[in-house]
Image (cartoon, helix red, strand yellow):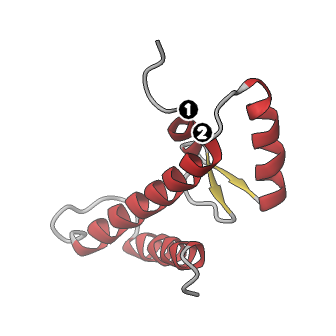
Amino acid sequence: IAIGDPAEDVSNFFYEDISLMPWKMRLSKKNKEIFLKAYMKGLKDKTFLARLDVWLIFWLFSDWMYYKWRIENYENEPVETPKALYIEHEQKLLRALKKKWGLS
């Protein structure tokens, strides 16, 4: 019995076309296709790619919300990371979300 969603697991490994978190790879569209082709060789799951796209958007939005929250609460919960870095990453994530949704 498998617990969880393989599409969610894979979605945690990478961003498309942006790089922020050191634990996530940055994959171009071509590299994403190569990676997924290799991953899916033994996978018999017809809805995997559709679910993966949903998870990628979910994590992008979730990360964006974290940065938004961190910026708005920076004075209340100070950290060593400069606020300017949070702002820069929040803007990158917002641009990526807009691109994903066709709003840019």
Which numbered disc covers residue 6?
1
Task: Compare residues 32 and 54 and report the one nearer the observer.
Answer: 54
**Residue 22 in view:** no
Question: 87 above or below 56?
Answer: below
Question: Where residue 47 sits in the image (x, y, percent)?
Answer: 60, 42
Residue 42 x, y percent position in the rendering: 76, 23
Q: Residue 49: horizontal and vertical position, in percent?
A: 64, 47
Which secondary structure lies at badge 1? Answer: helix
Quarter of the rendering occupied by the C terminus = bottom right
Residue at image x 59%, y 51%? 50
- Look at 54% across and 47% down and name the residue there: 51
Q: Nearer the viewer, residue 88 or 41?
A: 41
Left or right? Give the position of 86 relative to 31. Answer: left
Local crowd size for mark 2, using a 10 Å CA cut-off: few (<14), some (14–19), many (≥20) = some
Amino acid at dot 2: Val
Residue 77 appears at what percent x and percent y?
19, 61
- Image point 51% across, 72% down: which residue? 97
Tell me if label 2 and label 1 are in contact, CB under 8 Å.
yes
Mark 1 crowdedness (10 Å alpha carbons): few <14, some 14-19, many ≥20:
some
On screen, 81 above or below 75?
above
The outermost residue toward the front is 46
Which mark identifies residue 10?
Answer: 2
Front position among marks 2 and 1: 1
Q: Which amino acid does label 1 sit on?
A: Pro
Q: Is 94 on the left or on the right of 36, as rendered?
A: left
